[in-house]
């Protein structure tokens, strides 16, 4: 896998401590720190930028970011947005988090990366996670502007040349072409990125259950076609169990507390995508949210089709370190590759158990 | 009832509670009319324990007890209108079809 050993060690010791020493049922793994919502792109469907102008002008201060990180305690901090490189104090925020030995994923569209890269120092704690939704045609269409793919490629090359850790993050919507996606993985692998992150695109729907079921089934089909007979050199920045989940080899429930979100409004309930209010403290978020109301098992229609990594990757990590079966499954998938049902398979994993 | 620019609801209206939920989901500014005759215009992002949480257009976050409110009016443009992923896909599909027809 594409994740360095030091990071895996930090995460594994953290999870074991949370589960078996502190006995925390609801513990965070990745803090989604949104320091601002403004962006230099205007991608269709991006709910993060659809706010009045005065909200888009606001941003978290360095102190607010540091306080949220310390309050949460997660070993990994993902900084999405908006576009984080637009924040004038982002280098200082990164510096403060590196000092605290947090593994940072700075999620950027890379438009400003070449211009601003000198403001950052390479570190094992800092990864530029570049938004790439496919090859040039697909990416430029997804971000609603021509030329952005080429900009992002240039940004990736500069960051790699300067010794930074670089990953890509890709959202795949239903209708994505598996062959083109596989070609995209080949391209990113050739560039030398450390790993690729994937998530199925998702917008919650109040559609009837039957429709929801079909959508989830289509997601499985898409990922089975993408991962079937994979290029052995592809590296993903995911637990291999998450890839098995995407392809419908196994089912995982959402652990929304695993990736708590903090932004100018406060701690967002219950997850990165849904907005059911805010709390002032992380403790209130954990203690006051009725977590049983979310995830596929809850029958909440807003969660019916959701398979995004911010809700489910933490579940796979919890499974790996919380059960012998999960641990052995991870070891097996790491060395032998994830189990991916054949594209023509009709298998639907049971909602009630691991597989 | 549909909450859109121009919609208003009085505190003593039976629909107030339902409307308030929709106003919180609305991606635009609202104006809060206070019982003392003053107004606060801004983005309402939450309601907790009978208290509105609002970012006024100028200044820091404010909390306004509902007991001090007389009316809320949706005064800002809906910034999410027509910007869904589905709308984008439909637009692109139409563009491609037009292009193919022209060829």
Image (spheres, rainbow, N blue to C red):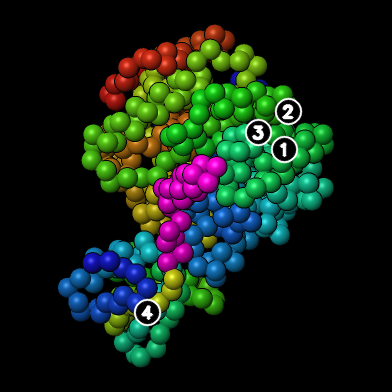
Q: Are marks 2 and 3 in contact (CB under 8 Å)?
A: no
> Residue A156, located in which quarter of the rendered image?
top right
Q: Earlier in the sequence, mark 2 or mark 3?
A: 3
- Magenta stretch bounds: B78-103
Q: Position of residue A9 (x, y in %)?
A: 61, 24
Tell me if I can see residue A16 in this picture.
no
Q: Are marks 4 and 2 in contact (CB under 8 Å)?
A: no
The C terminus of chain A - image quarter: top left
N-terminal of the pair, mark 2 or mark 1, is 1
Q: Secondary structure at mark 2?
A: helix
Q: Secondary structure at mark 4?
A: strand
Q: CA distance from mark 3 to mark 1?
A: 12 Å
B4 in the magenta segment: no
Q: Does the segment drawn in magenta span residue B89?
A: yes
Expressed as whole percent of the image width and height from the top left, the position of residue A66 reads: 62, 52
Q: Which mark is residue B32?
A: 4
Q: Are marks 1 and 4 in contact (CB under 8 Å)?
A: no
User: In the rendered image, which residue does mark 3 sit on?
Assistant: A167
Q: Indicate which disc residue A191 carries.
A: 2
Instruction: Please give the name of the residue rendered at 42% of the width and 66% of the height, measured from the top-left corner.
Output: B78
How many neighbours does mark 2 have within 10 angstroms: few (below 14), some (14-19), or many (20 or more)? Answer: few
Which residue is the site of mark 1? A153
* Label 2 to label 3: alpha-carbon separation: 11 Å
SS at badge 1: helix
Left or right position of A25 against A82:
left
Q: What secondary structure characterizes most of the magenta part?
A: helix
Number of numbered markers: 4
Nearest-to-viewer mark from 1 and 4: 1
Q: Residue at x 49, y 32 (%)?
A: A176
Left or right of residue A243: residue A289: left
């Amino acid at each position: 896998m594409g994740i360095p050993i030091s990071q895996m060690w930090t995460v594994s010791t953290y999870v074991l401590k949370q589960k078996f020493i502190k006995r925390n049922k609801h513990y965070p793994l990745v803090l989604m720190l949104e320091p601002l919502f403004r962006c230099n792109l205007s991608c269709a469907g991006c709910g993060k930028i659809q706010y009045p102008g005065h909200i888009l002008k606001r941003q978290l201060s360095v102190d607010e970011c540091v306080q949220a990180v310390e309050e949460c305690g997660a070993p990994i901090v993902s900084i999405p947005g908006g576009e984080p490189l637009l924040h004038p104090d982002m280098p200082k925020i990164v510096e403060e988090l590196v000092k605290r030995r947090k593994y940072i994923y700075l999620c950027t569209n890379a438009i400003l990366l070449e211009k601003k890269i000198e403001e950052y120092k390479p570190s094992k704690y800092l990864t530029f996670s570049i938004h790439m939704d496919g090859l040039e045609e697909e990416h430029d269409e997804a971000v609603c502007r021509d030329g952005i793919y080429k900009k992002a490629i240039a940004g990736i090359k500069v960051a790699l040349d300067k010794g930074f850790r670089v990953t890509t993050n890709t959202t795949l919507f239903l209708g994505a072409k598996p062959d083109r996606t596989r070609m995209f993985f080949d391209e990113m692998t050739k560039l030398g990125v450390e790993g690729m992150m994937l998530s199925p695109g998702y917008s919650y729907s109040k559609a009837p259950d039957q429709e929801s079921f079909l959508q989830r089934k289509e997601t499985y089909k898409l990922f089975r076609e993408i991962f079937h007979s994979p290029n052995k050199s592809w590296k993903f920045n995911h637990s291999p169990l998450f890839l098995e989940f995407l392809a419908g080899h196994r089912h995982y429930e959402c652990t929304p507390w695993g990736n708590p979100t903090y932004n100018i409004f406060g701690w967002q309930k219950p997850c990165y995508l849904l907005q059911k209010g805010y709390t002032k403290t992380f403790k209130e978020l954990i203690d006051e949210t009725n977590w049983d109301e979310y995830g596929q098992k809850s029958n909440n229609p807003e969660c019916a089709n959701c398979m995004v990594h911010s809700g489910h990757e933490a579940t796979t990590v919890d499974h790996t370190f919380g059960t012998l079966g999960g641990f052995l499954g991870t070891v097996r998938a790491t060395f032998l590759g994830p189990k991916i049902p054949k594209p023509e398979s009709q298998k639907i994993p049971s909602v009630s158990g691991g597989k | 009832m549909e909450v859109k620019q121009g919609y208003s609801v009085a505190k003593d209206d039976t629909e107030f509670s339902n409307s308030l939920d929709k106003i919180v989901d609305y991606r635009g500014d609202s104006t809060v009319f206070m019982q003392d005759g003053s107004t606060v215009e801004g983005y309402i992002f939450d309601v907790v324990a009978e208290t509105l949480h609002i970012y006024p257009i100028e200044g820091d976050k404010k909390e306004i007890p509902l007991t001090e409110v007389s009316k809320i009016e949706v005064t800002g443009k809906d910034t999410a209108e027509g910007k869904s992923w589905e709308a984008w896909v439909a637009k692109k599909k139409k563009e491609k079809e037009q292009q193919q027809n022209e060829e």
